[in-house]
Amino acid sequence: MADIKLNVIKPSVNNMAARVFVRAAGLTFDENDVYGQTRSDDFLARNPAHLTPMIEAKALPKGALWESCAIMQYLCNKHGLEQFYPTDPERRAMIDSAMFYLIGTLYPHLARATYPALGFPQYAGEVGASEAGAAEKETARKAAADALAEPLSVFERFYLDGKPFIGGDAPSIADIRLASTLEFLAAIDYALPGWASDYVKRMEATLGDAYAEPAADVRGYIAYVKSQKA
Ligand SMILES: N[C@@H](CCC(=O)N[C@@H](CS)C(=O)NCC(=O)O)C(=O)O
């Protein structure tokens, strides 16, 4: 049995990030598909947040760790994966900033914009999860989609700034997190700026099957939900 058990929901880009990472890093892991099981008593006993991706490893104080970026950071620290998460404080700060900015700013807009099309539940307190009518929900969804342009442009102008990857010449964990996230925009046929589609292609070309295999699950799910609406 591998030291790392990675619990996943395959259509999710949060999960895709961790799945791409463990493959790209060449780690030994067992992948466990927990689709539909995250609210079971057994899962909640191990992970009361019921979130995936979630790794389980004996060395962890509570045996379990969730949050895709924390998982990638931990595994880089544990296995000395300098190429994905540099130890130089300034370079690392940029990777951390890009990931926090993604989780705190880009992803909430992206979830509000794409989750209705993906058939994923929206977060409590948002228009999409409220008793509002379809027209109001679509207005709110569109506002979120429109709001994506700014954080996307920040990734292009600030974090990438002409470099092939946020990490420089090679992909970092922030790149894995960003490229995976961008995959969901196909669900709403979002007009991805040229730099972003080139960037995703560059990530896939650089990481090969490590990227393509988890991406195929996300892309397959998007194709499936679209086929149901056609
Ligand atoms: N910020 C988290 C988000 C994790 C998350 O939202 N996971 C969802 C799938 S996209 C999940 O596992 N949901 C199952 C549930 O809540 O029961 C991360 O990056 O890992």
Image (tube, rainbow, N blue to C red):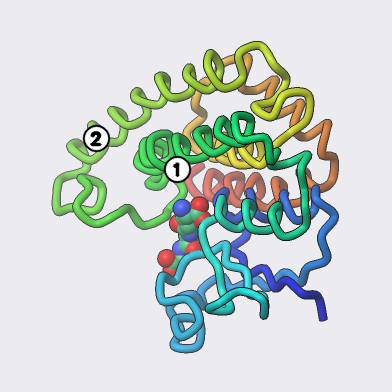
The residue at 46%/85% (across/down) is: 45
For residue 74, the mark is none
Neighbor class of circle 2 (other Cα within 10 Å; few <14, some 14-19, many 20+) is some
Nearest the eye: 153 or 9 = 153
Q: Give the Cα separation between the discs numbered 1 and 2.
A: 20 Å
Could you tell whether 104 is left or right of 59 in the image? left
Could you tell whether 95 is left or right of 135 in the image? right
The residue at 72%/24% (across/down) is: 168
Residue type marked 2: Ala
As drawn, 222 above or below 194? below
Mark 2 vs ligand 1: CB under 8 Å?
A: no
Nearest the eye: 5 or 80 = 80
Residue type marked 1: Ile
Mark 2, residue position:
140
Mark 1, residue position:
103
Earlier sequence position, callout 1 versus callout 2: 1
Measured from the top left, where is residue 176 in percent x and y? 66, 40
Label 2 residue SS: helix
Quadrant where the N terminus sits is bottom right
Could you tell whether 200 is left or right of 25 in the image? left
As drawn, 109 above or below 132? above
Measured from the top left, where is residue 84 in percent x and y? 73, 41
Nearest the eye: 216 or 228 = 216
The residue at 44%/88% (across/down) is: 41
Mark 1 vs ligand 1: CB under 8 Å?
A: yes
Q: Quadrant of residue 5?
A: bottom right
